[in-house]
Image (cartoon, rainbow, N blue to C red):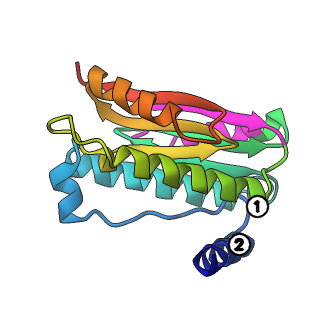
């Protein structure tokens, strides 16, 4: 119980110190990630740059920064935009900003027109994401598959699955994800290798 309270407190502190759009969590590429990932080193770096550049551009716009809650996730150049914008005009501005970021090949628009989600909803989404990731780590029956190379994103109870997968791998991931509690919907943003 103490660990849960500590984690919740830390998450709240991070979220309260951040503006609505902020999340600039670009992580350096580790050697072990390269061994597992089906993307090339250059693509991984490019995807990290897409995310970083998008957050930088979005945070430069005071209206987007103040009134929107935006998540940007790039995988193999495909860029998933989730979150909330309170008006069609702001949503259009967000999409137009991300669309011109270098190396964005395709935009998956899942940005809702709504007020930004509250901290409770965001914490619930984080817990769902962690639950799905933990469940997927139990997959041991598929040769050459590492669930750590997938991106799992949750927004308002909707789980988005991104990655380069074989069709049979995708089916197993989807079916295992369906079994996890609290999920309203699953959206696949897979790029299939076969």
Secondary element under disc 1, as helix, strand or loop, is helix
- Residue at x-position 56% and y-position 38%: 159
Find the magenta span and give its range: 91-114
> Alpha-carbon distance for marks 2 and 1?
7 Å
Secondary element under disc 2, as helix, strand or loop, is helix
The reply to whether discs 2 and 1 touch (Cβ–Cβ < 8 Å) is: yes
- Residue at x-position 56% and y-position 30%: 186
For the residue pair 175 and 193, the one nearer the viewer reads as 175
Side of 115 where 151 appears, left or right: left
Instruction: Write down the residue under mark 2.
Output: 12
Residue 102 seen in the figure? no
Q: In which quarter of the view is residue 127 placed?
A: bottom right
Residue 4: where, in percent of width, then height? 62, 73
Residue 122: where, in percent of width, then height? 69, 55
Q: Is residue 1 above or below residue 137?
A: below
Residue 162 seen in the figure? yes
Residue 114: where, in percent of width, then height? 83, 40
- Residue at x-position 51% and y-position 34%: 179
Instruction: Write down the residue under mark 1.
Output: 119
Q: Quadrant of the C terminus?
A: top left
């Amino acid at each position: 119980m103490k660990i849960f309270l500590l984690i919740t407190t830390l998450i709240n502190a991070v979220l309260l110190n951040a503006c609505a759009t902020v999340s600039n969590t670009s992580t350096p590429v580790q050697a072990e990630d390269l061994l597992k990932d089906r993307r090339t080193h250059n693509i991984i770096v490019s995807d990290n740059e897409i995310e970083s550049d998008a957050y930088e551009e979005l945070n430069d716009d005071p209206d987007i920064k103040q009134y929107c809650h935006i998540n940007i996730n790039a995988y193999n150049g495909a860029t998933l935009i989730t979150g909330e914008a309170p008006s069609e005009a702001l949503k259009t501005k967000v999409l137009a900003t991300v669309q011109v970021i270098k190396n964005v090949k395709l935009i998956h628009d899942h940005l809702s027109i709504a007020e930004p989600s509250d901290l409770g909803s965001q914490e619930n989404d984080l817990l769902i994401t962690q639950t799905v990731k933990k469940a997927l780590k139990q997959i041991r029956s598929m040769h050459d598959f590492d669930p750590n190379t997938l991106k799992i994103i949750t927004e308002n109870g909707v789980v988005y699955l991104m990655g380069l997968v074989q069709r049979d791998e995708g089916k197993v991931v989807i079916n295992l994800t369906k079994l996890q509690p609290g999920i309203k919907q699953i959206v696949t943003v897979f790029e299939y290798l076969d």
